[in-house]
Image (tube, rainbow, N blue to C red):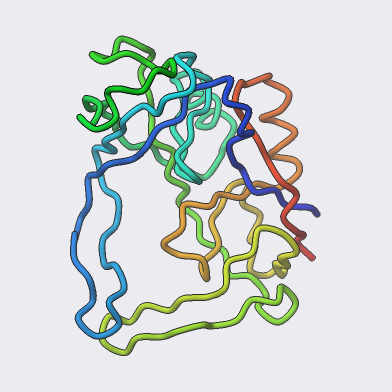
């Protein structure tokens, strides 16, 4: 079975955002200097210049926010995710001069929900060509090479979930779905949903 990485289609037809908080732990490990922070609710976002049209999906890299009809469909269809609150903040002063269109503030658009997949699946490192780059004994963080394509997941590790993240890629928000799950999403015609064939379950 094929798996797909969900991502922005990068057409700039729809608005994208920068996440500017909230962080659970805004500091560095004193030994490896790796970041110890994690995004937490509410997800504070600032709309980027390029478009003032809000799609059914909105993106900041792999962080994903959706409108209510998408949230309801994911819940009804058994996608393994929860949803966090999203709050829109004013534009940073140094970015107010942009001449490109963007979603105005104060924000009066549709309610947004932060998609937070609950499942973490461990990939087959050898077959995926993913290696451990660093491990810090102080903060216990492992960092692996990140791959967008060519990853392999064993059936026993997958456990039948529709939506998941890769354990070795934590704390990345990169979210994957099976081909059956992608067909469900595609059938609804949701806007601003991109994807890349990332590998397979076997």
17 or 94: nearer the eye?
Answer: 94
Coordinates of residue 153 in the picture (x, y in percent): 70, 67
Total marks shown come to: 0
The quadrant holding residue 130 is bottom right
| Residue in view at x 71 percent, y 65 percent | 151
55 or 115: nearer the eye?
Answer: 55
View extreme (top): residue? 108
Using residue 69 as the reference point, say whether residue 19 is left or right of it: left
Location of the C terminus by quadrant is bottom right
Using residue 7 as the reference point, say whether residue 200 is left or right of it: right
View extreme (bottom): residue? 137
Image height check: is 92 above or below 105? below
Coordinates of residue 56 in the picture (x, y in percent): 53, 21
| Residue in view at x 19 percent, y 59 percent | 26
Using residue 192 as the reference point, say whether residue 49 is left or right of it: left
Coordinates of residue 62 in the picture (x, y in percent): 50, 46
139 or 19: nearer the eye?
Answer: 19
| Residue in view at x 77 percent, y 60 percent | 200
Coordinates of residue 186 in the picture (x, y in percent): 71, 27
Image height check: is 160 above or below 196? below
Image height check: is 170 above or below 139? above
| Residue in view at x 47 percent, y 48 percent | 117
12 or 135: nearer the eye?
Answer: 12
Location of the N terminus by quadrant is bottom right
The quadrant holding residue 131 is bottom right
């Amino acid at each position: 079975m094929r798996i797909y990485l969900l991502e922005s289609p990068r057409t700039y037809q729809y608005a994208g955002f920068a996440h500017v908080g909230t962080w659970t732990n805004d500091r560095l490990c004193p030994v490896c200097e790796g970041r110890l922070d994690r995004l937490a609710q509410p997800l504070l976002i600032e709309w980027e210049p390029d478009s003032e049209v809000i799609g059914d999906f909105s993106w900041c890299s792999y962080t994903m926010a959706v409108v209510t009809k998408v949230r309801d469909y994911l819940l009804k269809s058994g996608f393994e995710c929860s949803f966090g609150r999203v709050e829109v903040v004013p534009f940073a002063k140094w970015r107010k001069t942009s001449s490109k269109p963007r979603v105005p503030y104060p924000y009066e658009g549709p309610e947004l929900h932060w998609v937070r997949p609950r499942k973490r699946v461990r990939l087959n490192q050898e077959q995926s060509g993913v290696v451990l780059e660093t491990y810090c004994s102080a903060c216990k963080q492992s960092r692996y090479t990140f791959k967008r394509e060519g990853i392999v997941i064993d059936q026993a590790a997958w456990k039948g979930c529709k939506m998941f993240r890769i354990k070795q890629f934590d704390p990345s928000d990169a979210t994957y779905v099976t081909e059956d799950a992608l067909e469900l999403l595609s059938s609804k015609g949701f806007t601003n949903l991109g994807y890349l064939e990332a590998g397979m379950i076997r």
